[in-house]
Image: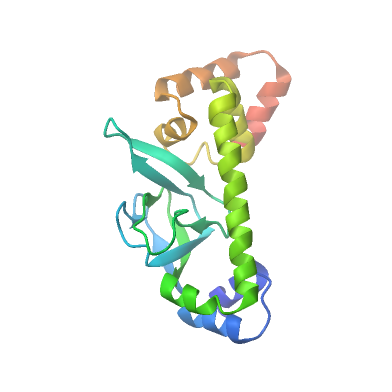
């Protein structure tokens, strides 16, 4: 069984049939080097990417000309695309933060396969998951202190801290790299065993 067929069977729970055949036929595999971009701001959304392994981020350019990390994806099966309709240019650049592997599905093929209700259901599940994640991030950014945001990140993104540039994490959390460094130092120095264990568990 091919790797892409295994993905659709195990992750999407698809069985034999024309939908699975169509997806397998249209899908390709791509290895990404650290720093490689799969899409840039303004590019047509001609493909949808699904993460097999690695860590990627979506980012845009802020008013000050600096990159702003909008999302970080590290879970197998995560969709790497913007929230806009496929016929609109991408508002985000999507970049690999470590060596990564993705499945590549042309949006034209995806649109054709929407004739299958099962795929529409899977697509809606992705949308629901994306909305829920978006809301959790907004709550963290606007209702949590910088310290709470950092601890939230450790819980929600286990194992990511030691693998990617801390500048990206700081940008994602809406704090400066200096603040992030200070938080990490302060938490390491605190005597609270509970917090120390939490940080050790989530960072490793």
Q: For the point 61% across and 62% down, which residue is it?
A: 124
Q: Residue 184: x, y in percent? A: 53, 22
Q: Nearer the viewer, residue 101 or 18?
A: 18
Q: For the point 37% across and 67% down, which residue is it?
A: 46
Q: For the point 59% across and 81% down, which residue is it?
A: 19
Residue 150: name its quadrant.
top right
Residue 204 drawn above or below residue 189 = below
Relative side of 194 to 31, left or right: right
Relative side of 78 to 155, left or right: left
Relative side of 128 to 102, left or right: right
Q: Nearer the viewer, residue 108 or 158?
A: 108
Q: Residue 20: x, y in percent? A: 59, 81
Give the position of the N terminus as an image quadrant.
bottom right
Q: Residue 58: x, y in percent? A: 42, 47
Q: For the point 34% across and 54% down, which residue is it?
A: 36
| Scheme by which the image is coloured | rainbow
Give the position of the C terminus as an image quadrant.
top right
Residue 168: name its quadrant.
top left
Residue 17 visible in image: yes
Q: From this viewpoint, which residue is outermost toward the left?
A: 65
Q: Residue 65: x, y in percent? A: 26, 34
Relative side of 166 to 89, left or right: right
Residue 204 visible in image: no
How many marks the image carries: the answer is: 0
Residue 41 drawn above or below residue 45 = above
Q: Nearer the viewer, residue 51 or 59?
A: 59
């Amino acid at each position: 069984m091919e790797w892409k067929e295994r993905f659709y069977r195990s992750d999407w729970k698809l069985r034999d049939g024309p939908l699975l055949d169509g997806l397998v036929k249209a899908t390709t595999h791509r290895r990404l080097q650290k720093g490689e971009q799969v899409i840039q701001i303004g590019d047509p959304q001609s493909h949808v990417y699904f993460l097999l392994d690695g860590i990627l981020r979506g980012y845009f350019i802020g008013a000050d000309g600096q990159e702003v990390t909008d999302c970080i994806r590290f879970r197998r099966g995560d969709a790497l695309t913007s929230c806009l309709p496929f016929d609109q240019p991408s508002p985000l650049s999507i970049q690999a933060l470590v060596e990564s592997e993705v499945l590549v599905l042309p949006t034209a093929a995806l649109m054709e396969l929407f004739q299958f209700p099962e795929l529409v259901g899977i697509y809606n599940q992705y949308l629901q998951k994306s909305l829920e994640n978006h809301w959790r991030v907004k709550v963290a950014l606007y209702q949590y202190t910088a310290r709470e945001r950092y601890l939230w990140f450790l819980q929600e993104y286990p194992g990511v801290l030691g693998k990617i540039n801390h500048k990206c994490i700081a940008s994602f959390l809406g704090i400066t790299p200096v603040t992030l460094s200070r938080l990490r130092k302060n938490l390491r120095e605190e005597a609270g065993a509970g917090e120390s264990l939490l940080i050790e568990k989530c960072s490793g």
